[in-house]
Amino acid sequence: MSGSSSTRDRVRLIVDRLEDRYGTIDWWHAPPDEVMVGAILTQQTRWENVERALDRLRAGDLLSMAAIEAAPADLIEEAVRCTGFFRVKTCRLQALARFVIDEHGSVEAMAAAGTDELRRDLLGVPGIGEETADSILCYAFSRCSFVIDAYTRRLCACAGVDEPVEGYRHLFESVLPPVNVRYRQTHAHIVEYAKSQCSRKRCEECSIRSLNA
DNA sequence: GACCAGGTCCTTG
DNA sequence: CAAGGACATGGT
């Protein structure tokens, strides 16, 4: 990580500009079990396909850690097929469900754990990397863990900020006030902006690029 | 038909 | 540690 203040100022500028542009938006409010499932299903996958899978799981009463832990794998596979990597993702979902049930007893019980401990434990579950862990912490457990995804890296690259993943995380966490709603909102802003304005084709005219000067 | 999508893991150099 | 491949379906 480079703690360079000019880099941090640039990130602060990104955050402020996005807030001016989009204002208050409330993103991904769903029950914790559903957030955890969605966080895994959205790996390398468009969200629209994830929603289909979530609907299928819900229809089969499979949208809870307890149900996923108990269900036969082929039932899960069938429901999540539309998100791609369906065998791998089914394994990951069941590994997460087993972790929740075996190590904590329930999702509600998990909420009692501290953020650092939770993060470390989640990263120990096969199939859960940094982004998935932080998504779960931020959107399922309302913690101040900033999510660094492909959109965030693309947008930052546009603005001339180039860091290793941990660098990005600490940059954003040093700029944002320690309030969960700001974390989820800023990440939502980045996704909205990057999707519409900073796609591979349009990046040249992306206004964030002007922060380079 | 090529190319990409809100990653993660495993193998190599 | 960086780079490359595997995992797979669905949309443009």
Image (cartoon, coloured by chain):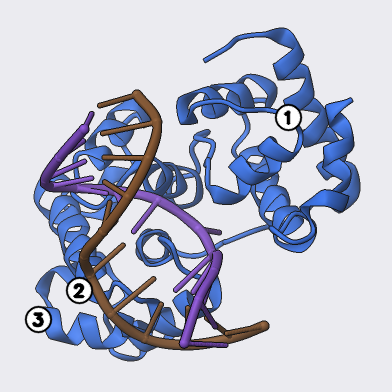
Chain colours: A blue, B purple, C brown
Mark 3 neighbour class, 10 Å CA radius: few under 14, some 14 to 19, many 20 or more: few
Label 1 amino acid?
Gly
| Quadrant in which residue C3 is drawn | top left
> A155 or A79, which is in the foreground?
A155
**Residue A7, above or below A200:** above
Q: Is C10 on the left-hand or right-hand side of B10?
A: right
Q: Nearer the viewer, mark 3 or mark 1?
A: 1
Instruction: From the top left corner, tell me how far across and down residue A154 is, in percent.
Output: 64, 45
Query: In which quadrant will I find the C terminus of chain A?
Result: top right
- Residue at disc 3, secondary structure: loop
Q: What mark, if any, has residue A160 been given in the picture?
A: 1
Mark 3 or mark 2: name the one nearer the start of the chain.
3
- Which residue corresponds to mark 3? A72
Pointer 3 and pointer 1: residues touching (CB < 8 Å)?
Answer: no
Q: What mark, if any, has residue A90 been given in the picture?
A: none
Real-space Cα distance between discs 1 and 2? 38 Å
| Quadrant in which residue A36 is drawn | bottom left
> A180 or A86, which is in the foreground?
A86
Q: Is A136 on the left-hand or right-hand side of A169?
A: left
- Which residue corresponds to mark 2? A87
The residue at 61%/22% (across/down) is A171
- Identify the chain of the residue marked 1, using the numbered disc in the image: A
Instruction: From the top left corner, tell me how far across and down residue A8 is, in percent.
Output: 71, 18
**Residue A213, above or below A56:** above
The residue at 34%/26% (across/down) is A116
- Identify the chain of the residue marked 3, using the numbered disc in the image: A
The residue at 18%/86% (across/down) is A75
